[in-house]
Structure formats: C-alpha cells, structure tokens
Image (spheres, rainbow, N blue to C red):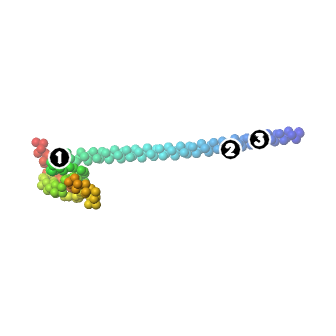
Amino acid sequence: MPFWVWLMTGIAVLAAGLALFAAIHIKQGQVERAEQELATQQQLRETLEQAALTTSNASETSAEQLRQAAAWSQARRLPASPILEHLVSLLPDRGFFQAMSYTSDETMNLTIQFDTSRQGAYYLAQLKESDWIESASILQMDTSVDETEEDAKKILELTDGLPRYLVQYEIIFNEQAVLQKLEEAKK
C-alpha cells in the first residue's frame, strides 16, 4: 500500500481518537457540573428545611408565649380597670397619668404629671390612706425643666408659667382588700 494511504489512515485514526478523547472530556465536565449542581441543590434543600424548622419552632415558641400571656392575664386576680378607676379618683384636678406598668401581680409603677410638687406629695398621702393599697412610695420626682435649661426657665418666667412635675410611684396593692371591695361593689 502506498504511503499516503497509511498516512491518511493514521490521520483518520488519530482524528477519531482525538474526537473520542474530546467527547469523553466534555462528558466528564458535564458530569462534574451536574454533580456540583446536585450538591448545591441538596445544600439549598437542607438549608430551606432547617429554616422551615426554625420558623416552625419560632412560631410555636411565639404561640406558646402568647398562650402563657393569655393564661397569666386570665389567672390575674386583680382586674386593672377598677384599680385604674380608683387611682384616678384619688388624683387632684390637674394630675395626669403618664405611664403605668405592673412589676408583679400586686405591684405597679405609676408615673403622674402634676402642676406642683405639693400635689405629688398630696397624692402619695391619698394613696397611703386608701384601703386598696398596702404601701406606696415615691421612686423619683423630676421637673419638666432641667436646672441647666436657661432658655426654658426664661420662657417660664416671661409667661408666668410653671414647670410640670413628673412623679414615679411604686404602689403595692392589698389584694384581699381590693377583691373584697370589688365583691361589695357587685352586690
């Protein structure tokens, strides 16, 4: 056989080998990309499942906290509405509630605004005389004008205005007396 036939056959075999090598290499790349995509999808699925579990646990926790808060408010023996009505009835004419919070079932912190410090002291005396209240004390008293606020002081002087006093009280209720008064009021 002539040399050129051998040469053509060799080139054809070499080209077929190169084509086969290239096809195998391309397929390996596709397989590797598919495996990477599969691994990414599995990680994504695991992450989503974990997030769903966390969200489920968080909503269960929130729901449980809400149930506990509802149970606490239902088990609460001292109703807030009559207590607030009683506290308001003790206020002087220009006394205003600013904030209120329960620190325990029988203890309340109450912040009230007055025109004078004397009204704050009078209200404390009223609280101490009440049958509903076991003890009351002033935790803090502030004015609406700070000692360093010269401009505010000048405005108050020019307008014959008075600073407002914010008084924070701690009130401990006599639970038995409150419940007894509420029962008597129902009759």
Kind of residue indicated by mark 2: His
**Location of residue 1 (image quadrant):** top right
Q: Residue at x 47, y 44 (%)?
A: 48
Residue that numbered label 1 is attached to: 85
Name the amino acid type tagged 3: Ala
Of residues 4 and 171, the one nearer the viewer is 171
Q: Earlier in the sequence, mark 3 or mark 1?
A: 3
Q: Residues within 10 Å of mark 2 (few under 14, many from 20)?
A: few
Rendered residue at 16%/55% (across/down) = 119
> Which disc, if any, is residue 25?
2
View extreme (right): residue: 2
Mark 2: which secondary structure?
helix
Q: Amino acid at mark 1?
A: Glu
Q: Nearer the viewer, residue 135 or 146?
A: 146
State yes or no: discs 3 and 2 in contact (Cβ < 8 Å).
no
Q: Is residue 90 above or below residue 139?
A: above
Image position of 83 (left or right of 50): left
Q: Secondary structure at mark 1?
A: helix
Q: State the residue position of label 3.
A: 15
Q: Is residue 139 left or right of residue 25?
A: left
Instruction: Report how far apart the C-alphas of labels 3 and 1 lie in the structure.
Output: 99 Å
Residue at 13% in and 54% down = 126
Locate the C terminus by quadrant. Answer: top left
Horizontal side, residue 35 vs residue 19: left or right: left
The answer to whether residue 10 shows anywhere in this view is yes
**Between tags 3 and 1, which lies in front?**
1
Q: Is residue 134 visible?
A: no
Marked residue nearer the N-terminal end (1 or 2): 2
Residue 148 falls in which quadrant of the image? bottom left
